[in-house]
């Protein structure tokens, strides 16, 4: 055990800086063989799983679980940042710098002179600023900017929400009973399963086709 590791084991409480130092030690030449082998891709699934476990803690309204799972998710952020730092791409401070700049830019009603008195006005400003940031010039670019890595149903929900604002929303069938939406979705999944159809891929492919058909002007 080196002196840095010894000092950390003797502490009675820890901070974000300690977590960062622990990750440095784990990834060092004389560190943990497993941690040293990991790449962005090898721990990609871990990031997804930890995110879902945070959501489970929220849904259970369990503070102890939420605290633990947020820690696991924080580890993933520090892990990825460390891997990137070793490759000379960016470090954890760059990550913090980026999100701080984004929050300041997208909250002009707090850090500027823009007036936004309701949550709807805040979101309207947020979307407008984001569109300029991402250099999204037309509806197709706005819709295609929704992450393709999202689960298809979540991606569909986000795309439909943005498409409605843009006036390009898919044509919906007659009004549906909100109380039966879950049952309807389950029935569709069951029918697709019987037909050998991968619902996730089918919906994802349909979203791609829908976006491709949206005019660029």
Image: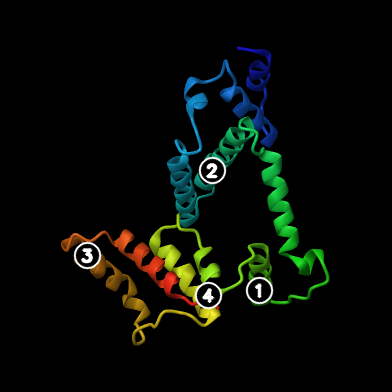
Residue at 57%, 15% (x, y): give it.
30
Percent x, y of residue 97: 73, 47
Characterize the local packing of mark 1: few (<14), some (14-19) or many (20 or more) Cα atoms within 10 angstroms. Answer: few
Kindly report which numbered mark, 3 or 4, lies closer to the viewer in this rendering: 4
Q: Answer whether labels 3 and 4 touch (C-beta < 8 Å).
A: no
Kindly report which numbered mark, 4 or 2, lies closer to the viewer in this rendering: 4
How far apart marks 4 and 2 lie (CA) works out to 38 Å
Characterize the local packing of mark 3: few (<14), some (14-19) or many (20 or more) Cα atoms within 10 angstroms. Answer: some
Q: Answer whether labels 2 and 1 touch (C-beta < 8 Å).
A: no
Mark 2 secondary-structure assignment: helix
The disc placed on residue 5 is none
The disc placed on residue 192 is 3
Of the numbered discs 3 and 4, the one sitting upstream in the chain is 3
Percent x, y of residue 99: 68, 52
Kindly report which numbered mark, 2 or 3, lies closer to the viewer in this rendering: 3
How far apart marks 2 and 3 lie (CA) works out to 34 Å
Residue at 48%, 26% (x, y): give it.
37
Of the numbered discs 2 and 3, the one sitting upstream in the chain is 2
Percent x, y of residue 70: 55, 45
How far apart marks 4 and 1 lie (CA) works out to 30 Å
Residue 186 placement, left or right of 39: left
Mark 1 = which residue? 119
How far apart marks 2 and 1 lie (CA) works out to 28 Å
Residue at 33%, 60% (x, y): give it.
200
Mark 4 = which residue? 216
Of the numbered discs 2 and 1, the one sitting upstream in the chain is 2
Mark 2 = which residue? 73
Quadrant (top left, top right, bottom left, bottom right) of the C terminus: bottom right
């Amino acid at each position: 055990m080196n002196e840095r590791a010894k000092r950390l084991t003797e502490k009675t409480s820890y901070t974000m800086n300690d977590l960062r130092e622990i990750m440095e030690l784990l990834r060092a030449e004389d560190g943990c063989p497993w941690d040293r082998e990991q790449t962005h891709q090898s721990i990609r699934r871990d990031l997804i799983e930890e995110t879902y476990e945070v959501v489970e803690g929220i849904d259970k309204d369990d503070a102890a679980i939420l605290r633990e799972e947020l820690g696991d998710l924080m580890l993933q952020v520090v892990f990825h940042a460390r891997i990137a730092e070793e490759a000379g791409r960016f470090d954890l401070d760059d990550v913090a710098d980026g999100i701080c700049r984004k929050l300041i830019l997208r909250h002009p009603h707090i850090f500027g002179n823009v007036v936004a008195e309701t949550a709807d006005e805040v979101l309207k400003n947020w979307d407008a600023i984001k569109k300029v940031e991402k250099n999204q010039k037309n509806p197709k670019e706005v819709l295609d900017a929704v992450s393709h890595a999202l689960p298809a149903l979540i991606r569909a929900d986000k795309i439909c929400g943005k498409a409605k604002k843009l006036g390009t929303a898919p044509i919906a069938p007659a009004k549906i009973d909100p109380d039966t939406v879950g049952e309807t979705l389950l029935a569709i999944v069951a029918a697709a399963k019987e037909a050998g159809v991968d619902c996730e891929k089918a919906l994802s492919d349909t979203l791609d086709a829908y976006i491709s058909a949206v005019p660029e002007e």
